[in-house]
Image (tube, rainbow, N blue to C red):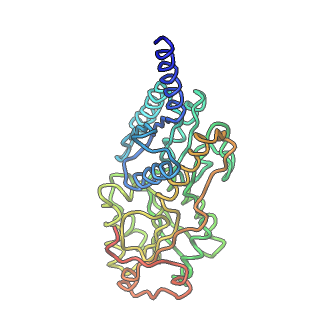
Amino acid sequence: MKKSICFIIMFLLTFSLCHAQDSFHIEVLQVSKINPFDWAYEGFVEELANNGIVQGQNLIINRHIIDADADAGLWKKVGILLKIKSTASDIIKTKPDLVLTISTPATKYSKDKFISAGIPVVFTGVAVPQAVGCATLTQAGPGFTGASLYMDPVSSFKLTRLALPDLKTIGIIHSDDDNAIAFVEEAKEKALSLGITVISDEVGKSDSPVQAAQKMIDQGVQAFGIPIDAYYALREYEPTSQLLEIIGKNKIPAICFCHVGFSGAIFYVGAEFKKIGSLSGTQAVRILKEGSAPGDLPVLFQEDLTILVDLNASKNIGIEMPLQLLQIAKTVDSERK
């Protein structure tokens, strides 16, 4: 009888140990509640599941979203920063196996706390790796890695030139979003090599883009670019709709340098949030199942940028999309959501 009881106890202990080794705990820290980040999160979770790490079976995953969608003055920005720090501290107390950070602010202002606590960090939804402390575009650093939405502005402007061969000036309206500012700064510098001048204007997240757009129209801009910027996804894409309405009335095309949930630009080029989330998932799998050190894993990118053309949008403003662009793009209609 004693032998039977000992056997049962040993079996249960062995089962518990094996189960513990096969179970994973991930915490997610996200700043800004917008649906592109939902897509990134979905891609991440799906990739984990594809590799046998399934929520509700052997995965516990908790998502913390810090709302930073409204305009933030100095004190509010300090408040958001403190919220990120305090949430990171709360996450550390739960002792997760890994933390996924979604967005540039979430990564930039929390990763050092996690790394110091010995928790691996994987980021997603970041457009410029160096903006979150990566050593280079492709190498993060000790304790963290991730997948980036980065796109060289030269590539996007070369494609823009296919659709608009006479383009000399392009206007970009953006908020204080880290990704947007980084893109605009790099775009201004690199577009000049192609003979294109970028005119930009920063607006508050609660502001309409109409006044800034009208000012640029009066200056004679020939097109508008929409960067990766949480601003455009706010309030059910209200800023986007307002911008497209005023430039549409003036028969000025829009080019979207990202993939988000609206229609009306003549074409879209960039990495897809869900694919980037999936790439971040592959990083997490290597860390959790293979024991890879995050710092040894290079930052991942979507190798072939997704290019979409909206033939209805181009037709509405009298632009015929060139065959050279149509051959490398997929088409969407103006009802895409």
Q: How many marks?
A: 0
**Image-quadrant location for residue 233:** bottom left
- In the displayed structure, 232 sits above or below 246; it is above
Residue displayed at 50% across by 42% down: 101
- 98 vs 126, nearest the viewer: 98
> x%, y% of residue 29?
45, 39
- 150 vs 190, nearest the viewer: 150
With 233 as the anchor, is 176 left or right in this view?
Answer: right
> x%, y% of residue 110?
52, 35
- In the displayed structure, 46 sits above or below 121; it is below
With 243 as the anchor, is 149 left or right in this view?
Answer: right
**Image-quadrant location for residue 245:** bottom left
Looking at this rendering, what residue extends furthest in the top direction?
Answer: 2
> x%, y% of residue 121?
56, 39
- 275 vs 6, nearest the viewer: 6
**Image-quadrant location for residue 62:** top left
Residue displayed at 45% across by 45% down: 54
- 291 vs 140, nearest the viewer: 291
Residue displayed at 52% across by 20% down: 10
- In the displayed structure, 93 sits above or below 180; it is above
> x%, y% of residue 13?
51, 22
